[in-house]
Image (cartoon, rainbow, N blue to C red):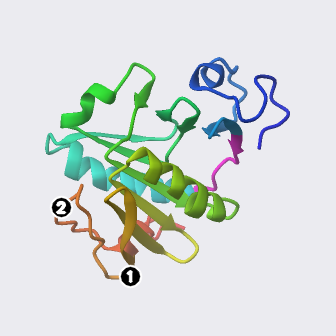
Amino acid sequence: MADWVPGPPQGSWTYEAYAALPDDGQRYEIVQGVLMMSPVPELSHQGIVGEIYSYLCSQILDKGRGLVFTSPIDAVLSTYTTTQPDVVVLLKEHLDRLQKKYITGAPDLVVEVISPGSKTYDRLVKYGVYEKAGVPEYWLVNASEQTIEVFLLESSAYRSAGLFRGEQLPVSRIVPDITITAGQIFDWSHGLL
């Protein structure tokens, strides 16, 4: 929790108060009115995000199905909840949710890459936030275990579509017929390092 940041009491933060914060180089989110600070991601985290973004652009943007964004992009899910997912997909039938500086309402797909300090936050807190907001699909990417878990929203609750690793092809409703293996997502340096 970012208790040191001047502003409303914890539990009362709104998008308006959050948007008024001066740019101090930090990455913040609001979960149920509580201002949270995310640490600066590691380079491997950024590489994995880049691989996912590039692949999703080829499947969504290049095919005219919608838009793909990487953090920092605000997803204003409710009055008291604003997140900055690592990767976001907004299909063309929901482009009305795109505002000048943020997405209002649930994106179609949210991807979070777990950092060493964010495992519980991404697996429990954000999982619950995205489920409650009605995000149809949530990918939880674990860099240290090199796995991708895909959650699909069914009757207002997430169901795991599977835990994918190595040569397995992740399953998705938003990105049909995925052609990149789970292992290729983690090969972001392509042997350069």
- Compared with 88, 5 (above or below) is above
Q: Quadrant of the C terminus?
A: bottom right
Q: Mark 2 — residue?
A: 176
- Compare marks 1 and 2 and give the one earlier in the sequence: 1
Image point (31%, 80%), residue name: 168
Instruction: Find residue 139 and report its horizontal and vertical position in percent.
Output: 41, 61
Q: What's the amino acid at mark 1?
A: Gly
Q: Is residue 136 magenta?
A: no
Image point (76%, 24%), residue name: 8
The quadrant where residue 171 appears = bottom left
Q: Is residue 39 magenta?
A: yes
Q: Is residue 62 left or right of residue 191?
A: left
Q: What's the amino acid at mark 2?
A: Pro
Q: Is residue 27 left or right of residue 7?
A: left
Whether residue 44 can be seen here: no
Magenta stretch, residue numbers:
36-44
Q: Nearer the viewer, residue 71 or 15?
A: 15
Instruction: Find residue 119 and report its horizontal and vertical position in percent.
Output: 63, 65
Taking the view exactly as shown, the residue that stands out farthest to the right is 4
For mark 2, give the secondary structure. Answer: loop
Q: CA distance from mark 1 to mark 2?
A: 19 Å
Instruction: Find residue 151 and report its horizontal and vertical position in percent.
Output: 38, 65
Image point (44%, 27%), residue name: 102
Number of callouts: 2
Disc 2 crowd rating (10 Å Cα; few below 14, some 14-19, many 20+) is few
- Compared with 163, 136 (above or below) is above
Q: Mark 1 — residue?
A: 166
Q: Nearer the viewer, residue 55 or 3?
A: 3
The quadrant where residue 177 appears = bottom left
Taking the view exactly as shown, the residue that stands out farthest to the front is 155
For mark 1, give the secondary structure. Answer: loop
